[in-house]
Image (spheres, grey):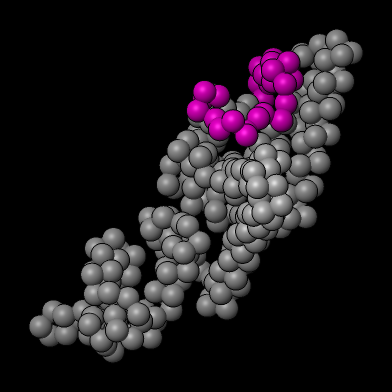
Amino acid sequence: MYQVSDFAEKAGVTVRTLHHYDRLGLLKPSGRTEAGYRLYGERDFGRLQQIVTLKFIGLPLRQIKYLLDGCDLDMAATLRLQRRLLQEKRLHLEAAIQAIEEAERSLKSNRAPDLVALKKIIEVMERQNAMEWTKKYYSEEAQAKIAERAKTFTPEMQAKVTQDWNDLIRDVESAISSHEDPGGAKARKLAERWSAFTRGFTGDDPEVQKGLNKLYADPGGWTASFKKPWSDDVEAFIKKAMAAHKTSCT
């Protein structure tokens, strides 16, 4: 067991940081001396490593606390998760670096900024920040739940979800073109599929659903790069179908 100054030195953090984490309930000391001084042990090193890594990835401290307190993952599973998140971050950084290098080469050749190269940098950065701006619509509790569920969401799963959504939107557009009745059987099936996809994201969690509702109710707050994948006509048809069949709607 180490007193706070010794533990801070061995862990490579400041005493002030440890006090702050203690106040937040993020890293409570394993014990106290008779005089009341904090004592830290081996378990605390493991917890601190998780906190530092998740903070580096970009998660806020309150969200880290929620994840760690509600997570029964062992150290091996936690390290695998951290490795995967860091690998994703590395891919984003490598793409950004590559785009900037291309712009630098273009600048040397042309002695003037290549707008195409600069546009690519913007696109890469926007993709990386694509979901950051949406956090303002979700509570910290909802953000933590979304992050928790994302742990098992592979690129293959993302590709399938995207394809399924595209197929559904195309089917709704076909129903509109065929002048299908929103109260009819075909519209009912479309509404059920739409609700199922929405539940796939929210996990039937009311807090996540509340944030999703806020997001789509505030188009004025969207970034320029964000566009709904469906048209207003598709949205209007689905809302009518859901109202007719009393199916939950986003």
Q: Residue 88: x and y, percent? A: 63, 61
Q: Is residue 172 left or right of 249 when viewed as pictured?
A: right
Q: Which residues are magenta?
A: 218-247
Q: Is residue 62 depicted above or below 218 in this figure? A: below
Residue occupying image coordinates x 25% and y 86%: 6
Which sits in the foreground, 224 or 171? Answer: 224
Q: Is residue 19 left or right of 237 when viewed as pictured?
A: left
Q: Residue 84: x and y, percent? A: 63, 66
Q: Is residue 7 depicted above or below 134 in this figure? A: below
Q: Is residue 169 left or right of 83 when viewed as pictured?
A: right
Residue 241 on the magenta span: yes
Q: Residue 228: x and y, percent? A: 67, 29
Residue occupying image coordinates x 71% and y 41%: 116
Most extreme residue toward the left, as rendered?
A: 35
Say which quadrant the C terminus sits in. Answer: top right
Most extreme residue toward the front, as rendered?
A: 111
Q: Residue 117: x and y, percent? A: 69, 45
Residue 21 on the magenta span: no
Which sits in the foreground, 170 or 223? Answer: 223
